[in-house]
Image (cartoon, helix red, strand yellow):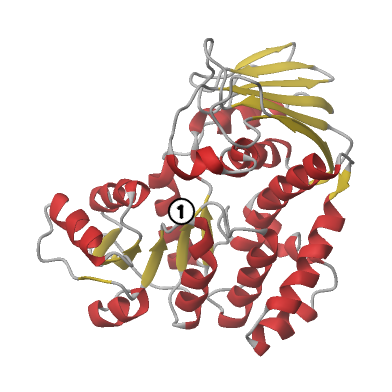
Amino acid sequence: MRFRTIPSSPADPLRVVLVGAGSMGRAWLATIADSPEVTLTGIADLNVALARDAADSAGLPYLPVGADAEALARQTGAQALINVTVPEAHHPVTSAALFAGLPVLGEKPVAENVSRALSLAAAAEVTGELFMVSQSRRWNPQLAALRGMVARLGAIGTVSTAFFRSERFGGFRDLMAYPLLVDMAIHAFDSARFLLRAEPVTAYCQSYNPPWSWFAGDANATVVFEMEGGTRYVYNGSWCSPGGITSWNGTWRVSGEKGTALWDGDHEPVLDAEVDVSAPAGPPYSGIAGALQVFVRALRTGELPSGEVHENVMSLAMVEAAVQSATSGRLERLDDVLERAHAQALRDETRPDVRNALARWPSVRDRLAGAERLGML
């Protein structure tokens, strides 16, 4: 997908508005402040007092704030928007920004469901503006090193992630039906796509809640994905597993025809194989700072970034397929998940231009995996 470029440089930084002044918004505020590539022109939040407090806490008492992100962008001359709102607000905030001529860097997930994510992909096509999702673990140098090892293992049989934590969040996560799958597992699912350079074909999930759980919904899940080429990716995790906790990245094992690669999620991966052990250098950045740097570079050069909306949707589709399988008790085909979401997007879309763009797609998988896939591979 082609998108409009915006010239910028450290001498002329990209002007951005931050939308969302909660805890993640404040993490982004610090990241923006540390970057020479961008300059913050304002903070938008429906709770204007919260936006004002965030600006004051960052030592920016005169920074403009407001409830309307597009109006604030016009007022301050912003060139792009960083969307750090709650998932349910991702679609309306991002769609409005794209049609206001503002490229968007958004927090994961791309939207609250795949249907709304497809609407945003079509909106990016219609407007010609870049919408990139900050799937921040893509920029982990250790994950990049693991990916380099995987490329030398020949055919891959199984990839597995173990994720076990004991987290007492309080708030909305405690009340979710599938807190682990919906709130956390997308990081691992996206990383598996990145490691394998392959997309999911089917998903089978068993989700459950142990008797000691403090979550209302299922805090435990095991999911098996068949990936393109026949590799199986297995995710096994829990939000309420006291003792022996894993990294926030989980622990990984990749089993291939020429050996095995292991990663504990916090240190350099280890290759146990009779192949060259040298690993290619990872990216010179990580986390949300890396996402911001890649976003700015893409706007300067027109280079399709990893995390561009079309490329990112399949990670959310893996979550949706896992939840649907947990609910139905059956194996779910990703193409069925995508086609149902596409039909729903066509029914719900209120903009004729976006609906027409959606209707022209030959198939959802083909549209998502066209030139956009170059951003991942």
Report if residue 276 is visible in the image: no
Q: Is residue 337 left or right of residue 209?
A: right
Q: Is residue 112 above or below residue 324?
A: below
Which quadrant holds the N terminus?
Answer: bottom right
Report if residue 31 is visible in the image: yes
Q: Is residue 267 left or right of residue 64?
A: right
Reading the image, the residue beneath label 1 is 294
**Residue drawn at the location 52% of the way across and 74% of the way down:** 95
Front residue (pair 225, 222): 222
Q: Is residue 360 above or below residue 335?
A: below
Residue type pointed to by label 1: Val
User: Which corner quadrant of the image does residue 234 belong to?
Assistant: top right
**Residue drawn at the location 69% of the way across and 77% of the way down:** 348
Q: Is residue 249 above or below residue 174?
A: above
**Residue drawn at the location 86% of the way across and 39% of the way down:** 329
Q: Is residue 370 left or right of residue 307?
A: right
Expressed as whole percent of the image width and height from the top left, the position of residue 312 reads 63, 54
Q: Is residue 39 left or right of residue 227?
A: left
**Residue drawn at the location 49% of the way across and 64% of the way down:** 89
Front residue (pair 306, 282): 306
Expressed as whole percent of the image width and height from the top left, the position of residue 152 reads 73, 26
Expressed as whole percent of the image width and height from the top left, the position of residue 3 reads 55, 74
**What SS does tag 1 mark?**
helix
Q: How many marks?
A: 1
User: Which corner quadrant of the image does residue 163 belong to?
Assistant: top right
Q: Is residue 23 above or below residue 127?
A: above
User: Which residue reaches farthest bottom?
Assistant: 352
Instruction: Check disc 1: other Cα within 10 Å, few if <14, some if 14-19, many if 20+.
Output: many
Expressed as whole percent of the image width and height from the top left, the position of residue 91 reads 54, 68
